[in-house]
Amino acid sequence: MTNPALAIVVGSNRRDSINRKLAQGIAKLAEARFDVKFVQIDDLPVYNQDHESDPPAPVTRLKNEIKAADALLFVTPEHNRSIPTVLKNAIDWGSRPYGQSAWGGKTAFVTGTTPGAIGTAMAQETLRTMLNFLGVVTLPAEAYITFKPGLIDEAGRIADESTRKFLQGFVDRLATLTAQTAPDKQRSAA
Ligand code: FNR
């Protein structure tokens, strides 16, 4: 039996994104239980309903990659107490045309990091509301990560042991939830 497919969506298009670094660290924790793939969202055009029925190629690619996934990992910054534009754009494209959303039925773990104290809590809450509306089964999670120098090491691993264990717990819970949701795709998660 194969591992379930995990699509990772990073809510930042910044070259040196700390959320991408964190996502790469979590990906290493997930590789034993998931087939992991990063989904590109920074080349999507701005959403326009006029183009829904004949979408640009990056939109078709995004939808195919999401449809192929069993589980989703979102690692997002917070922009002005909400999610960044680039992520909202991807969610909107993936949700349309009406009745043909790519998101429904997936499981998801939502997290994010910021140098600030509240660790993207507002952005995560906003994102979970959207995902629940779209039929994604989100892990009940409060994984608010304050980014500090040394959190990620040179090899891209989560160097801080307590953060690594904390996030490993959520990855394991996502594997269990995904096994319950798509049991044919899981080796032995439960
Ligand atoms: C921010 N930042 C920020 N941080 C936060 O904790 N809460 C917030 O509401 C905001 N708002 C905000 C708006 C905009 C437009 C920008 C550019 C930045 C700071 C943010 O956490 C910081 O830039 C991170 O480095 C963003 O993550 P990436 O892009 O490095 O992954």
Image (cartoon, rainbow, N blue to C red):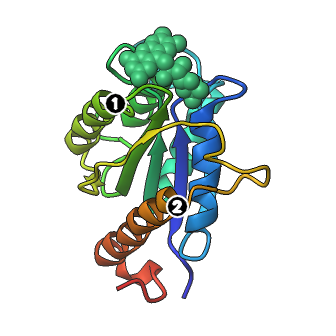
Q: Residue at x 43, y 25 (%)?
A: 116
CA distance for labels 2 and 1? 19 Å
Mark closer to the chain start, 2 or 1:
1
Q: Amino acid at mark 2?
A: Arg
Q: The residue tagged with tag 2: helix, strand or loop?
A: helix
Picture coordinates of residue 8 (x, y %)? 54, 49
Q: Is mark 1 within 8 Å of ligand 1?
A: yes
Residue 40 placement, left or right of 143: right
Check whether the beta carbons of the residues at disc 2 and disc 1 lie within 8 A of each other. no
| Above or below, 75 relative to 138 | above
Front residue of 2/144: it is 144
| Above or below, 65 relative to 76 | below
Residue 137 placement, left or right of 149: left
Crowdedness near tag 1: few (<14), some (14–19) or many (≥20) residues, C-alpha within 10 Å: few
Reading the image, the residue beneath label 1 is: 118
Reading the image, the residue beneath label 2 is: 164
| Above or below, 163 relative to 149 | below
Picture coordinates of residue 1 (x, y %)? 54, 88
Q: Amino acid at mark 1?
A: Ile
Q: The residue tagged with tag 1: helix, strand or loop?
A: loop
